[in-house]
Image: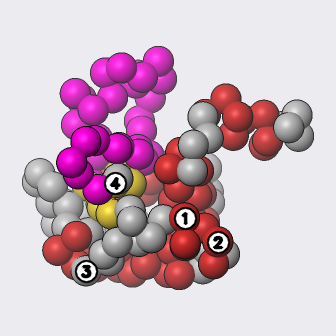
Amino acid sequence: MRSFADDNLAPIGDRLPADHLSPIGERSPSLAQFLALVRRAFRDLPQDWRDLCADVDIRVADAALPAATEPWEHADRDVLGSYCRRRYQPPTIWLYRTPILAFASDHSLPLAAVVEMVLIHEAAHHGGMTDTEMFCIEQGVL
């Protein structure tokens, strides 16, 4: 990852207060706690994946902006993360805190596991994989 400084992981838009209630009524982790999960997930990736993401900014926002998801066929669902590569800007992986919290809660999954899953998925996009290819791998087709 090109940079993992807090200013590089700062959320955009409105922040959720630290005592924001999760969808199941439990206390959500603070932004600092969520960023620590992201750091840990990155640190726990195999070295070749960390090397792959050496030039990638990883950022956290509360949710995806609608304009960012318009071209996607699945934009009607809550997006957990995205990968963006634009000319003259570093490639960026976005993790969307509120939908990730809701997904973990709705599916009774550990938050750290969901953060790791989203990070790996978006890193695979950086490596050139499509959603279809990832789905085929998950289904054992490739």
Residue 66 is covered by the magenta coloring:
yes
Q: Amino acid at mark 2?
A: Asp
Q: Earlier in the sequence, mark 4 or mark 3?
A: 3
Circle 4 SS class: strand
Q: Residue drawn 27% across and 32% down? A: 68
| Residue nearest the viewer, comparing 83 with 34 | 83
Residue 18 is covered by the magenta coloring:
no
Q: Amino acid at mark 3?
A: Ala
Residue, disc 2: 48
Labelled pair 2, 1 in contact (Cβ < 8 Å)? yes
| Residue nearest the viewer, comparing 15 with 40 | 40
Residue, disc 1: 52
Q: Which mark is residue 92?
A: 4
Q: Amino acid at mark 4?
A: Thr
Residue, disc 3: 5
Labelled pair 2, 3 in contact (Cβ < 8 Å)? no
Our reading of the magenta stretch's main secondary structure is loop
State the CA–CA distance, disc 4 to disc 3.
Answer: 14 Å
Q: Is residue 14 above or below residue 56?
A: above
